[in-house]
Image (cartoon, helix red, strand yellow):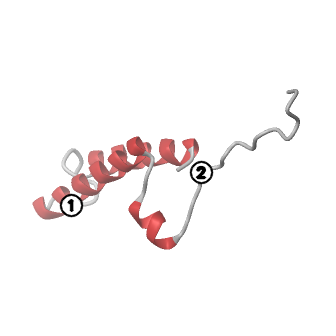
Amino acid sequence: MSLPDQVFRSFMGLSFIYLGPLSDVLTDDFLSSALLTIVGLMVIFSSFIGFCPLYHVAGFNTYIKKQKSKNPDS
């Protein structure tokens, strides 16, 4: 997972956590609030470890490997 993807996921996770139990904007139902919080925590956890199981299953990759220099002198 690339760094921009990790940063975006962190913000999305925090917004899910905020919208769940801390805000009545989307819902005032306990179950919906708990689900938003759990999803937010899972998104933040995946951003910290740099691995998304759904990306793996779908074969999607946002990580860009640095290419090695072909010139041995540099």
Residue visible at 43% across and 43% down?
11
Quickly name the residue at label 2: 63
Residues at marks 1 and 2, CA–CA distance in whole angstroms:
28 Å
Q: Position of residue 52 (x, y in %)?
A: 42, 57
Q: Position of residue 45 (x, y in %)?
A: 33, 46
Q: Amino acid at mark 1?
A: Leu
The image shows residue 74 at horizontal and vertical percentages of 85, 27
Q: Are the residues at dot 1 and dot 2 in contact (C-beta closer than 8 Å)?
A: no
- The residue that mark 1 highlights is 35
Residue 54 falls in which quadrant of the image? bottom left
Element on which disc 2 rests: loop
User: In percent of the image, x 45 and y 46: which residue is there?
Assistant: 50
The answer to whether 53 is drawn above or below residue 16 in the figure is: below
Question: Which one is nearer the viewer's eye here, 66 or 70?
Answer: 70
Viewer-side residue, 16 vs 71: 71
Q: Classify 28 as above or below 3.
A: below
Which residue sits furthest bottom? 58
The residue depicted at 39 percent of the width and 44 percent of the height is 49
Q: Dot 2: few (<14), some (14–19), or many (≥20) neighbours within 10 Å?
A: few
Question: Which is nearer the eye, 13 or 53?
Answer: 53
Residue at x 43%, y 52% (from the top left corner):
51
